[in-house]
Amino acid sequence: MAEYMKKKQSTRNLLIKAKKPEKKSIKYHKFYRGKIQVLPKCSISSIDDFSIWYTPGVAAACRNIVKNPNNSFELTNRWNSIAIITDGSRVLGLGDVGPEAALPVMEGKALIFKFLGGVDAYPICLQTKKPEEIIQTCKLLEPTFGGINFEDIAKPNCFQILEDAREQMGVPVWHDDQQGTATVILAGLINAFKIVGKNPKESLITLVGAGAANVRTAYILIRWGINPGNIFIVDSKGIIHSNREDISKENNLWKYDLAQKTNSENRTGEIAEAFKGVDVVVAASQPGPNIILKKWITTMADKAVVFACANPIPEIWPWEAEKAGAKIVATGRSDVPNQVNNSLGFPAIFRGVLDVRAKTVTDDMCIAAATELALFAEERGINEKNILPTMDEWEVFPREAVACAIKSIAQGVARIKPSRQELLEKATTIIQNARNSTKVLMKNKLIKPLSNK
């Protein structure tokens, strides 16, 4: 009884803690009136300098770019600028809130891009949900940006938009809810497999949820080397298999494709059937708790691994999963061990692709980033409660950026080819400068201190 009451109090405390940021949010957002701004990066000694930065001197830069449009990466901030594109159709756990209400999230994303990756990211919230209009908008914006980050776009549109934009554009295009989530999940699984001593190629993996995150996770895992037949995917109607009549090329090409490739056992039935005997469960479904039940985890293989990634509340509380027999449990939360957070991926990956002016972001580049994340954690020590780096370990971001950049060069999608050392020095300097700039602005109260913290 004492143990039960202790767990109940822990649950209550976490729920209270989860609500605290929301209580402060409106006050703090209104205080700062947004989270990002544009600041000069060039020297301005006197008003006369504008004759260089603007007219008449700027004409020389324009004429130079006319001769070679790629010089826009040398003479403007395009080399370090990306657009964060959303239609506001699937924002966090809020759903279809529209472009205006999506803007605070996109500003937050831009803030993380800058602080962790040194990337200048600009929120662009669109008043359309039509895939062709979103893609066309990105193509029209391409001369301004070195990359595109799609964010919070509902399925199935997100799949078509990502694939078509990647094919039609000459700058890297990425959907963080797909590629970003998959990258960090893979990084966590690499180390989890090492800790439990299992061979990934012989392991069974269940993905709970068939949205943007887990669909791309399935493809990334397969590309990494997981046997497709050893993967089971569960959607709201049960286990996906090749005989499901409700899944067709017409209504969901990607789910249909995975239905043909995965589940070689041809398992059928509800979610409980997908837990039996599997080594790993990765859930990216809906906020919990009690979306995953303890009794299902008891049917998993020994030394089971459970990633319950829903936010703000995971599909099952970590201690409940452990009590049911899970050896390693990860969630999306920062206040319990093993946080699986996209912020470990996207800032550094874009740092890497921008630094080589990559034309795209491939799945192999995501795998290279995941491998480096896992390696960084392994080198400083991993255990059942510590399988991934944290965002505080900023040194991981330059290393991850370099891994992604080197893979870009190897795959022939990089426009320039700096050495590994040059890339590491550049990424480290840019990321340090971004962090230090924020500290200097705060120290000098150019960023106003909060009235009460």
Image (cartoon, helix red, strand yellow):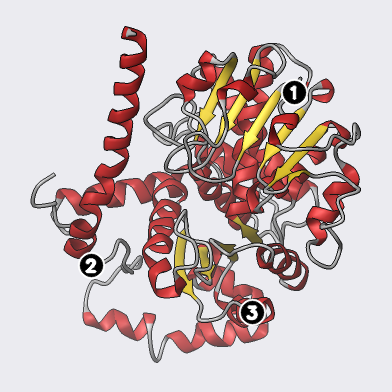
Of the numbered discs 2 and 1, the one sitting upstream in the chain is 2
Query: Is residue 229 or residue 315 the one in the foreground?
Result: 315
Q: Look at mark 3 in the image and give the residue it sits on.
A: 130
Q: Which quadrant, please, contains the C terminus?
A: top left
Left or right: 43, with 207 as reference point? left
Q: Which mark is residue 296?
A: none
The residue positioned farthest toward the bottom in the image shown: 56
Q: Nearer the viewer, mark 2 or mark 3?
A: 3
Query: Disc 1 on helix, strand or loop?
Result: loop
Question: Can you say whether 283 is above or below 108 in the image?
Answer: above
Q: Look at mark 2 in the image and give the residue it sits on.
A: 33
Query: Is residue 292 or residue 314 the one in the foreground?
Result: 292
Q: Nearer the viewer, mark 1 or mark 3?
A: 1
Q: Look at mark 1 in the image and give the residue it sits on.
A: 276
Bin the neighbour count of mark 3 within 10 Å (Cα to Cα): few under 14, some 14-19, many 20 and up.
few
Instruction: Point out residue 78 in the picture as x, y percentages from the top left corner.
Output: 53, 69
Quadrant in which residue 361 is drawn: bottom right
